[in-house]
Image (cartoon, rainbow, N blue to C red):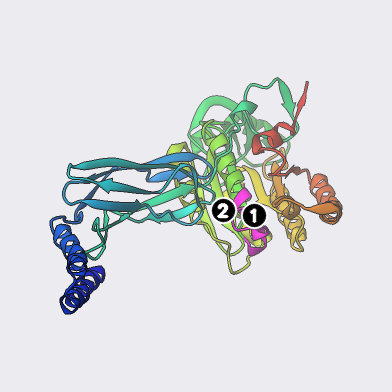
Amino acid sequence: MFSKEAPKLIGFTFIVFLTGLVLGNYVVLGTGLIPLFAVLLGLLFKRPDNVEVVEVEKKVSLWVGVIDTLRFDIVIKDGTGPISVVQQLPVNFQIMEGNNSRIVWKGRQEKRFSLSCKVRCVKRGSYFLPPVQWETQHPLGLQVAKRGSSGSGLEMTVNPRIMNVKRIRGIPGVASTPFPEMDIAKIGLPTTDFREIRKYVVGDPIKAINWKATARLARTGLLWPLVNEYEAEGKKTVWILLDGARYMEVGTATENVLEYAVEASGAVALYFLERGYRVGMYIYNGVGKLFYPDTGRKQFFKICRELVGLQAGKSFDELPQAVERLRGQILGYKPLCVIITRLDSRYSGLVVEGTKKITAMRSGWRKRRLPVIVVSIAAYQAVARKGEYEDNAAALLHLETRPIVDSLHRLGASVLEWNPRGESFATALLRQVRSR
């Protein structure tokens, strides 16, 4: 199909040629034939019509902040003329090296070239990478430009950044926070390692009754069976309580408290799962997503899939209500509870109330208080501060959280205050370890 330029050239030729005939001027007649020859010459060339795209390097699963390469090999077999190709990138993708567009000239021979760039995504989520767009043109512009796309679109998942906390292992120190490096599970297959003698409860097998200890107790007038309890197979359970409220979205679209909380949750889950612990997670405050405790990489990827698409909840169910919902799980497993939230909001008192409910859940003869860690990500640390006034405001907000932190300490909970812009999560955990 001819473009608008071809009729213009033919019309110009006709006008100039007719003028030359009227004037009887051979020079004008010859000048009028030049555009006609250009049109006839242009008809000998054909614009490129078919562009083949071969996806050489493509990533289905990416990680936030990690640089990956996208590369496409492009083949053009027929036609002559300029070709422009572009690979449109989804929102939140940054080009670190190379380019996502290119313009080449296709001659008489087959043309092969590559479109390559290194990209980095700055926010977790699911994205769609569209097919490669291309446009071909006639070398003299006598045909309409042809546009199209080649290749198949690609659904990509960008996983939250998982911070490295492996280097904590092996440090000769005494942990000031209750990380249960060698704690044994409360629920699991019993082993031959004796733990204690306790009172009989409904559900205990008859063969577990210690008849000699029961007889000695009966002499004192207490007629209640005693049973032998053995250590369970496996390690302790860790419960992650992630705050998914809307007030966690303080900051920018890519740097906010919720994004950092997701990263911290993934880091804690990976840390304990790699060491053989059961890890469960509950996302409270409007989300209500529950993952029952499990072990292994399968559990980690299950948690990661939920964290990828996590959006702040519209409703509000509070931490104390979440603890009540998990009462059976907490009493059964007696886990280490890791609460990830912010303490500089007007709902910080609910964190204290929820922590109090957890530490009050004691059972057995020892009546041990359950270990709790509160990871606090401050809103004033989520984005860069500019000027003296913002620094002073951040200092005041920090002071306002001191009574909340003191209340948590009195309950026996450990508080990890993390500044994501000033240190990594691994460094923050190292601060919780004191040397021997």
Please state the extent of the stretch shown in magenta in the rendering.
245-260
Q: Residue at x 67, y 57 (%)?
A: 251
Q: The disc labelled 2 sits on which kind of residue?
A: Tyr
> Could you say where residue 87 lies in the image, as x and y percent from the top left?
37, 52
Residue nearest the observer in this picture, 135 or 92: 135
Q: Is residue 167 left or right of residue 408?
A: left
Q: Residue at x 72, y 41 (%)?
A: 422
> Could you say where residue 375 lies in the image, as x and y percent from the top left?
69, 46
| Mark closest to the chain's N terminus, 2 or 1 | 1
Residue 178 appearing in the image: no
| Mark in front: 2 vs 1 | 1
The answer to which quarter of the image holds residue 263 is top right
Mark 2 and mark 1: Cα distance apart in space: 20 Å
Write down the residue under mark 1: 256
> Could you say where residue 108 lies in the image, as x and y percent from the top left?
17, 45
Within-10-Å neighbours for mark 1: few <14, some 14–19, many 20+: many
- Note whether 36 is above or below 426 in the view shown: below
